[in-house]
């Protein structure tokens, strides 16, 4: 990297030569060429730094100075903050297997900021396609292209809204920061696991939107009070937020159909007088009874979440599922999303017991199945049914007699 004084001297001397200090106004063409030259040299230095960082990782350069990690070396020696240091190392590693992208950075065809975004999705077999599309585009345009795509995707592949991430920067006081940390700790204690920034902010926003003094909301009221719109042709779903329609994953709409307050059609003229009354997918008394039965918390084994529970139909409504107590179960937002994404399955055994399983049929929380168990066709619900049946085959007297039978020692 340039030393600050040296780099400033180079740039200022070149601009002075163009009449930038104390002389006539510089020729705009010459000034443009010089600024573009600065950008190219900066990109070339970024490429050189990336190569150096990879070598520094290999020889563990930070140990020569007594630093605990290369991240600390970057912070103390090169002046990067923690997040920038992590990104610099990530990009440097990615460029080792992306020769075209590394060359574009070294030539100054792409800036470091653009390359940083491209390396989130580019792979060797997609490198040329992405570089062609990114040519001539701003960093913001490249960020938009990359958003919603995963490594290996091509630029014209469909965008997955679930992969789109938004960066929110907050400038808060020390008091608010302390409250933020306390809120995170409270949510983690409730769930029994670490929570992401996304999960914490979502819980705080839901608390504000619910408007309930106790923070718990009304048990008879649907969890979703948010405007969702689905295109009848392409089935893409958007959610209104602060005056902007934001595309969201289809699973959000599926969750809302389980437990929502329906406003009806808002995209037709109607007769100008009749406005349909909002309705709930689940009648309020039934919903309140379900939440009360489940003690106001998520029913998934081991889950401690008790805020903003949503009510799910075990048998989907599209398959004839009804709003009955036996067909409804309380779930937290994370587990409800897992159900609609196919990562979590819920069924009822013949005895009426709610059975939670992983996508591969394992009982929820059970260790991965062995190779022999993978060939067993029975579902977890069926295994519970067999256990129920075996137990019920014994009469009450037989079960008591078996339990009290003395142990014979040999």
Image (spheres, rainbow, N blue to C red):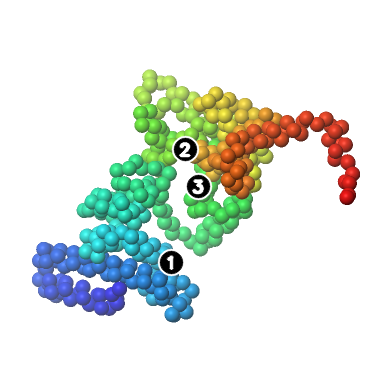
**Looking at the image, can residue 240 be seen?**
no
**Separation of marks 1 and 2 at Cα, in angstroms:** 34 Å
**Looking at the image, can residue 78 be seen?**
yes
Residue depicted at x 51% and y 49%: 199
Q: Residue furthest top?
A: 271
Q: Which residue is mark 3?
A: 202
Q: Residue furthest bottom?
A: 65
Direction from residue 97 to residue 212 in the image, left or right: right
Q: Which residue is mark 1?
A: 82
**Separation of marks 2 and 3 at Cα, in angstroms:** 16 Å
Q: Secondary structure at mark 2?
A: helix
Q: Nearer the viewer, mark 2 or mark 3?
A: 2
For disc 2, the neighbor class at 10 Å (few under 14, some 14 to 19, many from 20) is some
For disc 3, the neighbor class at 10 Å (few under 14, some 14 to 19, many from 20) is few
Q: Earlier in the sequence, mark 1 or mark 3?
A: 1
Direction from residue 335 to residue 11 in the image, left or right: left
């Amino acid at each position: 990297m340039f030393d600050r004084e040296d780099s400033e001297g180079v740039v200022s001397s070149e601009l002075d030569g163009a009449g930038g200090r104390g002389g006539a106004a510089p020729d705009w063409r010459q000034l443009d060429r010089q600024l573009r030259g600065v950008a190219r040299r900066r990109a070339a230095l970024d490429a050189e730094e990336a190569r150096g960082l990879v070598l520094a990782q290999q020889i563990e350069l930070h140990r020569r100075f007594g630093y605990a990690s290369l991240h600390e070396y970057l912070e103390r020696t090169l002046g990067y903050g923690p997040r920038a240091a992590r990104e610099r190392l990530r990009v440097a590693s990615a460029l080792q297997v992306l020769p075209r992208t590394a060359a574009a950075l070294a030539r100054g065809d792409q800036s470091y900021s653009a390359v940083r975004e491209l390396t989130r999705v580019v792979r060797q077999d997609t490198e040329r396609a992405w570089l062609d599309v990114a040519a001539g585009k701003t960093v913001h345009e490249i960020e938009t292209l990359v958003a919603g795509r995963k490594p290996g995707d091509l630029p014209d592949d469909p965008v997955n809204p679930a992969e789109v991430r938004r960066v929110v920067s907050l400038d808060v006081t020390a008091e608010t920061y302390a409250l933020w940390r306390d809120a995170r700790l409270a949510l983690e204690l409730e769930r029994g696991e670490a929570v992401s920034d996304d999960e914490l902010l979502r819980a705080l926003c839901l608390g504000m939107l619910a408007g309930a003094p106790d923070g718990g909301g009304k048990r008879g009221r649907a969890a979703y009070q948010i405007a969702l719109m689905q295109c009848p042709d392409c089935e893409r779903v958007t959610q209104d937020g602060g005056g902007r329609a934001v595309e969201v994953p289809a699973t959000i709409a599926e969750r809302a159909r389980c437990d929502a307050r329906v406003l009806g059609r808002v995209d037709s003229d109607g007769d100008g007088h009749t406005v349909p009354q909002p309705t709930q997918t689940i009648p309020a008394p039934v919903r309140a009874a379900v939440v009360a039965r489940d003690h106001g918390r998520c029913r998934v084994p081991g889950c401690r979440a008790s805020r903003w529970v949503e009510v799910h139909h075990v048998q989907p409504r599209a398959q004839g599922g009804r709003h009955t107590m036996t067909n409804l179960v309380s779930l937290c937002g994370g587990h409800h999303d897992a159900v609609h994404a196919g990562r979590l399955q819920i069924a009822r055994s013949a005895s009426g017991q709610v059975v939670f399983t992983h996508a591969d049929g394992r009982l929820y929380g059970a260790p991965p199945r062995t190779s022999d168990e993978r060939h067993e066709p029975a579902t977890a619900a069926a295994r519970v049914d067999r256990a129920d049946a075996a137990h019920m085959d014994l009469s009450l007297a037989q079960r008591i007699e078996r339990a009290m039978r003395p142990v014979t020692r040999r």
